[in-house]
């Protein structure tokens, strides 16, 4: 997005402030679309199925109680599990959009097991890590870097008469 913005600033199609606002807006759009892309990729490549806590409660009530109490404690609304069948691994990770729409990626083995005392601390730690993440500063720093790169490109286009 930086190169087209630099070109449009150089050709006076956009002002510098307008380009900065457009860069920030496009970054917000990309960040909002990223969880949807992750969901699609997991369902396509890992054959993940998404399970809500209500469905987990039918098969594994102990795990559902542990997950719902952890989500209440951390104020995480709408947790969904991305369950993968083909793995024997106990690895898990989470993703979402600024504490909204959290996803927990787990194996079917973990979902089917009774409330395992060994996996519960890992799930709690992963949800706590997810809840404590705040990417706002990184997001704004990246947008600032893009604006600086855009201004550098505009300057270089002016020096070398590229437009």
Image (cartoon, grey):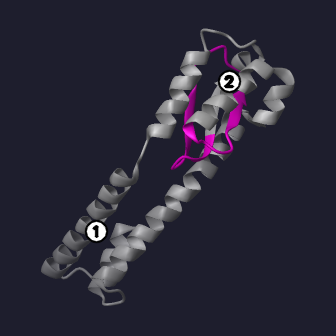
Image coords of residue 6 (percent x, y)? 30, 76
Q: Report the residue at 22% width, 77% height from top.
A: 154
Image: magenta residue range: 74-102
Quadrant of residue 2 within the rendered picture: bottom left
Q: Which residue is mark 1?
A: 147
Q: Report the residue at 31% width, 86% height from top.
A: 15
The residue mark sitting in front, 2 or 1, is: 2
The answer to whether 117 is drawn above or below residue 29 in the figure is: above
Q: Report the residue at 69% width, 33% height from top.
A: 81
Q: Which residue is mark 2?
A: 66
The Cα atoms of the two marked residues, 2 and 1, are separated by: 45 Å
| Residue 65 included in the magenta stretch of the image | no
Q: Please tell me how crowded label 2 is: few (under 14), some (14-19), or many (20+) other residues with Cα within 10 Å.
A: some
Which type of secondary structure does the marked residue at label 2 adopt?
Answer: helix
Of the 4 image quadrants, the one containing the N terminus is bottom left
The answer to whether 100 is drawn above or below residue 105 in the figure is: below
Residue 85 shows in the view: no
Left or right relative to 74: residue 58: right
Q: First in sequence: mark 2 or mark 1?
A: 2
Extreme residue in the top direction: 117
Of the 4 image quadrants, the one containing the C terminus is bottom left
Image coords of residue 104 (percent x, y)? 62, 33
């Amino acid at each position: 997005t930086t190169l087209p913005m630099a070109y449009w600033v150089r050709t006076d199609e956009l002002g510098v402030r307008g380009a900065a606002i457009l860069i920030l807006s496009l970054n917000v759009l990309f960040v909002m679309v990223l969880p949807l892309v992750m969901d699609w990729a997991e369902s396509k490549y890992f054959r993940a199925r998404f399970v809500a806590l209500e469905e987990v409660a039918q098969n594994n009530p102990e795990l559902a109680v542990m997950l719902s109490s952890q989500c209440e404690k951390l104020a995480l609304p709408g947790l969904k599990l991305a369950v993968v069948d083909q793995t024997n691994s106990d690895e898990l990770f989470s993703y979402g959009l600024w504490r909204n729409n959290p996803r927990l990626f787990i194996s079917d083995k973990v979902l089917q097991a009774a409330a395992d005392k060994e996996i519960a601390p890992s799930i709690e730690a992963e949800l706590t890590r997810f809840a404590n993440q705040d990417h706002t500063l990184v997001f704004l720093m990246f947008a600032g870097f893009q604006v600086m790169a855009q201004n550098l490109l505009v300057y270089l286009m002016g020096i070398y008469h590229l437009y």
